[in-house]
Image (cartoon, rainbow, N blue to C red):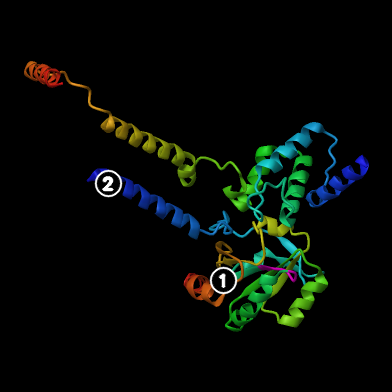
Amino acid sequence: MLKYLLPLGLFVGLLILLGVGLTLNPREVPSPLIGKPAPQFTLPRLDDPQARFDSAQFQGKVSLFNVWASWCVACRQEHAFLMQLADQGVTIYGLDYKDTREAGLQWIERLGNPYQAVAFDAAGKVAIDWGVYGVPETFVIDKQGVIRYKHIGPITPRDWEEKLGPLVAYLEKQS
Amino acid sequence: MKTLIAALWLTLALPALAGIEVRQFTNPELESRYQNLIEQLRCLVCQNQSLADSNADLAEDLRSEVYTMLLAGKSDAEIVDFLVQRYGDFVLYKPPVKKTTALLWFGPFAALAVGGLLLWRIGRTRRPEAPTSLTPAERERLQQLLKDEEKSS
């Protein structure tokens, strides 16, 4: 009996292994920054080169930190939903990644501004500190300024309902 | 004609060269360290390419990051660490041995061992039985049969 069951068992095992392999998304690289304080930085603000965006801003409230660019197609798709979230009172900060100031400002003007403030990272250096490897990417930051989650790709209403929304609600309740 | 063909070949090769910038090194040791580093670091955008091969924008930025750190006198380990802190072990083509990568490192050997064990067991059970010698009674009967055969033919 074992003689027949063993090969069958091995075959099923292999099938499961390959099946799991197929459903994994290799584009999602887990961030080593989760559970760590947000990387410190100071950048000029998109709307005013004289004003500074300081990472100390993340302290004291739960916020999203959304990395975007005007040349990024998926960001456009995401933008409308970010507007909705902002209307619901979610605090969103932006990082305009490897963009020109004019293009970034035009984008905000045309599509609306869901951000409390946008940092302007023309060289993409700060994004490297955050481990960004594609736009859009969104970090969930808690009241202590600690990164709790990283979402890769545009946030869809479903992502919000299933993952980000509940996490933000949970973090809001914490002191 | 030969020059023309050579020129054509070069044109074909141009797109491949387009994304990779040339870096100036005054020190050949630094240059070989640079080459070595960007070959063992993985590009996160085109994941099956190293930083050395990739034309992606991010790969270019990371190469320049590696370059400036080398010029600033950082050690190879410090540079690799810098990238791992930001992008995780994924950025390394050769990930370190630890709990989460144990399956990756030892899985193939385990599979090989299991396979070998199975082959060995199958080989043992299927080995043909050693020929056993006939009992005296059987031998006598055989002789008798052979004799009968001779007679009848």
Query: In the rendered structure, which amino acid carries the disc numbered 2?
Result: Tyr
On the picture, is B146 further left or further right than A16?
Answer: left
Q: Which range of residues does the magenta coloring cover?
A: A67-71
On the picture, is B22 further left or further right than A94?
Answer: right
Q: Main secondary structure of the magenta part?
A: loop
* Mark 1 vs 2, N-terminal side: 2
On the picture, is A24 further left or further right than B23?
Answer: left
Q: What is the number of the mark on residue A4?
A: 2
Q: Can residue A48 be seen in the rendering of this structure?
A: no
Q: Residue furthest left?
A: B137
Q: Can residue B53 be seen in the rendering of this structure?
A: yes
**Residue under disc 1 on the same chain as residue under disc 2:** yes
Q: Residue at x 49, y 60 (%)?
A: A23
Residue B40 painted magenta: no
Q: Decide which of A28, A36 is in the foreground and name it.
A: A28
List x then y, in percent, for residue A27.
59, 58
